[in-house]
Image: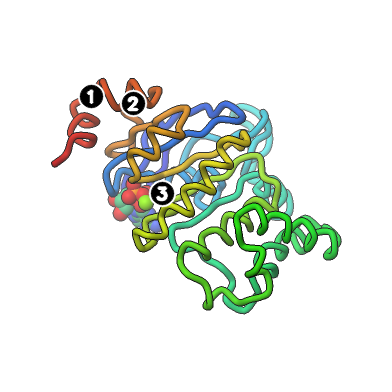
């Protein structure tokens, strides 16, 4: 996959396989293209070249080989539901309750019956420790609680993959732990996740694979122990052992 913005190259020759049920952590300096890569994965941005497949099915463009064409909006919306995204700044809907945030897309995008979506929504909120908060509005929540709602909203779509873009970067330090433990639990349950993070010890603990990006390219793909004890590139070494 490649991506440029008006001729400015941001991603170059990105090629990555995600094994189902694994957690991949993407590390790399600011500006290296991590967010753009996640946004291309779920087609929030259209790659300039290349493709994205889930279980062999294309996202964004249909057809094979060179003879592909853009998907119609409806088809695109439906394929994109298999990839959920959790953003640094939560992006909750302020006018909906917590439960409303969690059930909005299952009801209006997937067409699931409201009552069923609410029942499942409450069960998901219980899983992330927010049973008591189902009926309040987002502005009453702490940052850590907001991010747990955002994760619940992603889970409610029963996606095949969840992408996290620096899920704890906007949080006060004392709230980082509660969000990381929810993500840790999801990893244990075998969800397929891609997590852009600067939490090195967390990445080392939960990742099956570390992807190191720099300058719009993937510079290293390695098991966490290998990456953190014996990085292959100078860039990665400087990144890990920076003062
Ligand atoms: P990271 O998430 O690793 O910090 P980004 O993917 O946000 O990196 O950005 C990578 C590069 O792409 C940066 O140089 C950034 O300025 C540029 N970029 C990102 N989005 C856009 C955009 N919509 N238009 C132009 N340039 C962009
Ligand atoms: Mg980013």
| Residue displayed at 56% across by 46% down | 42
The residue tagged 2 is 220
Residue under pointer 3 = 35
- Residue 85 drawn at (x, y percent): 55, 51
Residue corresponding to mark 1: 233
In this view, 203 is above or below 5: above
Element type where label 2 sits in the image: strand
The reply to whether the C-beta atoms of the residues labelled 1 and 2 are less than 8 Å apart is yes
Q: Number of numbered discs present?
A: 3
Q: Position of residue 122 (x, y in %)?
A: 73, 61
Which badge, 1 or 2, comes first in the chain's sequence? Answer: 2
* Secondary structure under the numbered disc 3 in the rendered image: helix
Q: Position of residue 172 (x, y in %)?
A: 36, 63
* For marks 2 and 3 on the same chain, the one whose residue lies earlier in the sequence: 3
Residue under the point 78% across and 63% down: 118
Say which of 212 and 120 sits in front: 120
Q: Residues within 10 Å of mark 2 (few under 14, many from 20)?
A: some
What residue is at 47 percent from the left and 27 percent from the top? 208
Disc 1 residue: CB within 8 Å of ligand 1: no
Relative to 233, is 124 on the left or the right?
right
Separation of residues labelled 1 and 3 (CA atoms):
22 Å
In the rendered view of the protein, which quadrant contains the C terminus? top left
Count neighbours of disc 3 (C-alpha within 10 A) and say few if under 14, some if 14 to 19, many if 20 or more: some
Residue 7 visible in the snapshot? no
Gap between marks 1 and 2 measured at Cα: 8 Å
**Callout 3: CB less than 8 Å from ligand 2:** yes
Distance in Å between CA atoms under marks 2 and 3: 17 Å
């Amino acid at each position: 996959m490649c991506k440029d913005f008006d001729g400015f190259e941001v991603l170059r020759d990105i090629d990555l396989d995600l094994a189902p049920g694994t957690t991949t952590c993407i590390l790399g300096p600011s500006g290296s293209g991590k967010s753009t890569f996640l946004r291309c994965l779920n087609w929030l941005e259209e790659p300039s070249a290349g493709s994205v497949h889930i279980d062999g099915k294309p996202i964004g463009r249909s057809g094979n080989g060179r003879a592909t064409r853009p998907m119609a909006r409806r088809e695109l919306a439906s394929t994109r539901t298999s990839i959920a995204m959790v953003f640094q700044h939560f992006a909750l809907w302020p006018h909906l309750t917590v439960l409303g945030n969690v059930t909005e897309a299952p009801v209006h995008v997937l067409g699931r019956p409201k009552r069923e979506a609410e029942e499942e929504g409450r069960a998901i909120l219980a899983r992330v420790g927010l049973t008591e908060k189902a009926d309040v509005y987002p502005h009453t929540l702490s940052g850590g609680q907001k991010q747990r709602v955002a994760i619940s909203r992603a889970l409610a779509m029963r996606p095949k993959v969840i992408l996290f873009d620096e899920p704890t970067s906007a949080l006060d330090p004392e709230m980082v732990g509660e969000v990381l433990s929810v993500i840790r639990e999801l990893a244990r349950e075998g969800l397929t996740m891609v997590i852009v993070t600067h939490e090195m010890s967390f990445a080392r603990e939960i990742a099956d694979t570390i992807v190191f990006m720099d300058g719009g390219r993937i510079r290293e793909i390695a098991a966490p122990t290998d990456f953190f004890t014996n990085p292959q590139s100078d860039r990665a070494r400087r990144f890990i052992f920076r003062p």
